[in-house]
Amino acid sequence: MNKRDAPSAGEPVIHLTRDEAQAIGSGTHGDPFSVLGIHPCDKGFLARTFIPDAAEVTAFTLDGKEAGKLEPGFAPGLFEGKLKLRKKQQLKYRASNSGGEWTIVDPYCFGPVLGPIDDYYIGEGSHLRLFDKMGAHPLHHEGVDGTHFAVWAPHARRVSVVGDFNVWDGRRHAMRRRVDTGIWEIFLPGVSAGQAYKFEIIGAAGKSLPLKADPFARRAELRPQTASIVTPRIDHEWGDKAHREHWSSVEARRQPMTIYEVHPGSWRRNEDGNFLSWDQLADDLIPYCVEMGFTHIEFMPVSEHPYDPSWGYQTTGLYAPSARFGEPEGFARFVDGAHRVGISVLIDWVPAHFPVDPHGLIRFDGTALYEHEDPRQGFHPDWNTAIYNFGRKEVLSYLINNALYWAEEFHVDGLRVDAVASMLYLDYSRKDGEWIPNKDGGRENLEAVHFLREMNKAVYGSHNGIVTVAEESTSWPKVSAPVHEDGLGFGFKWNMGFMNDTLDYFSREPVHRKHHHDAITFGLVYAFSENFLLPLSHDEVVHGKGSLINKMTGDEWQQRATLRVLFTYMFSYPGAKLLFMGGEFGQRREWSESRELDWSLLAYPEHQGIKKLVQDLNGIYRREGSLHGACFKPDGFEWIDCHDSPQSVISFLRTAKGDRGYEAELLGRIETKAGKVTRLDVVAKGEFWGEGTYTRNAPKGRFPLAIAFTLADGKDAADTIPPQGSRGWLPGYMR
């Protein structure tokens, strides 16, 4: 075939030159579907296949009818021949050599799985179900069971999927390129769930890259192995309908939110020192949080990551729950179990940066694909990581889809977004000359701002009841304001000022505190400018900072007393609460990811006392509407005295003032006898917040309140039920 006879992209090659054949044999051909498979030829059909190590190959239809014997081609392992077929169809080949024979279903006889609608929305950057399209998905396609693979690598010359199913030989399963989107795809018959795979990519320069893990992989091998694993959708029968309906029907800012922050690898360990599985964690952690009165569990990143001391913040598998704790279904069971007892689950989410491990996203197709090419934009000097290119719609789609995936697939109740400040500022942790200004000459990362807004719009728009929390350490305005009000759209923001100022104050000797009185009063100046969450987080108990109790001043008795004061102060302070594991019982040693918490301390009454205090504070905070019902509004806070610095005393009043009552649907029942009203009841079904005469011990959320008018003879049971006594629907009530 000379150059004039060369086919256009996608057009089948009927007659191969030696160069074409050798390109197939060496795995460098960029369009294998134009060469391999079944093609019309001379009013019939021709089949061509590449099967290394085969000496003879015969083609069959899928129902076992022999279609023709194939002859060796110009390259070892390449076979072709005309078929005795009247219509184009899928083929399987019986291959043999001196060692025996085997059967292969030809993947190049199958059409694409992705369609033009996918291309359109992917090209537009608006596809919100990419996790159902990209990666590896077992499915039934054109009458055959197998797995569909898809990966984005627009600058690659060739992409193959490799695994045990093809002896990790990239020549065997080169993929089809979708020119409009830069996505490569292939359907591999017979490949099933549980099989390991990677992508073998020849970059734009013609150089083979390190084997790449799947960016959309739902499961990965346990470190130090790095392959992705074919995994179907989660097969779990959820029992959390009531939990999800509750949070969909209430305003999260009016509900108590007390969060227990957990590193799943070091909360507890097995007796042999290994990690607990998700099921083991569920057996211990969920009852513990119920006992302690926490409303939420927040996990440090659970996505797959290669290095234990990174705590998950350098993730190489955003879509895969870490194999350290078992299969993805285990995490689903954990979330479901927590929901069934009324506990919400948040996860730490890391869209700011990613590690430079060669099997990960770095220079994925030989170019700066997910990251910026210029290190002044694409490299983070503090963490030795790459920074996502938020200006690429494909990268935004990848990240936004990931946020939606955790909510969709695992029912998580919220995302704590890590390192937001590092995204917002182009000069974050950089010196002059080490960063590139935005189009207006400023330091604001406008592309990151756009990403965060779009992410929050997508998450809140798709999943009622979910919350997003920003770890943002600067004074960037309107972090927790809606996007339509020029905010970033987060539900809550970490109050880093509260954490730093408060810990600094409580670390000082009492005699010196009068000189630092503003450390505990200044925060109330801005306390209502955002929906603040008060964190005493993992960041404060590592890297030589010491444990929470050891930050307190004085001897051991004074430290325990001061820690109790700190907790009491935090739970009375406006805002949601977060406490890192171990702090609740006064862990003495600095936290380490390599060992479990020092649970033996609970044998001592001093530490049991701290634990009991946190338990009681959680209970009071949850019961008293004045402490949570209006904690994001200045109407719910009033100073009594903020100036008593000589005594180091402050006093304030927490109320639900201006934010008390019900948003209610009224249900009624009326009875008459002889033309007279003998009974009139009203039931208010709605959301309670604040505090009233009969609501001091009201449960959180929505519940009915019955109000009975004494119009009957007093014998009816409803006449004897006080308002606070009605906790369920009375039979007979009509909407």
Image (cartoon, rainbow, N blue to C red):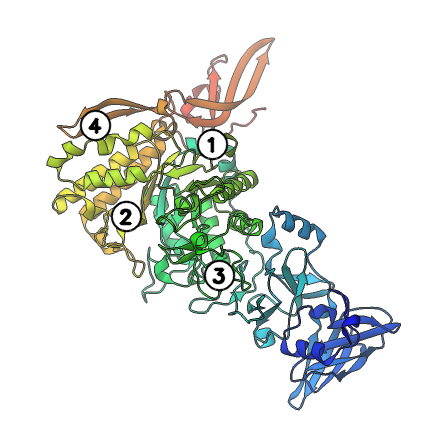
Camera-nearest label, 3 or 2? 3
Q: With respect to residue 76, does 200 lie above or below? A: above
Please report whichever mark, 3 or 4, sits nearer to the chain's N-terminal start: 3
Residue type of the residue flagged with mark 1: Glu
Residue 355: x and y, percent? 43, 59
**Which residue, given by chain and number where applicable, does mark 4 sit on?**
650
In-image side of 172 versus 379 (left or right):
right
Residue type of the residue flagged with mark 4: Ile
Q: Residues within 10 Å of mark 1 (few under 14, many from 20)?
A: few
Residue type of the residue flagged with mark 2: Glu
Q: CA distance from mark 3 to mark 2?
A: 31 Å
Q: Residues within 10 Å of mark 2 (few under 14, many from 20)?
A: many
Camera-nearest label, 3 or 1? 3
**Which residue, given by chain and number where applicable, does mark 3 sit on?**
362
Number of numbered discs: 4
Q: CA distance from mark 3 to mark 1?
A: 40 Å
Residue type of the residue flagged with mark 3: Ile
Q: CA distance from mark 2 to mark 1?
A: 30 Å
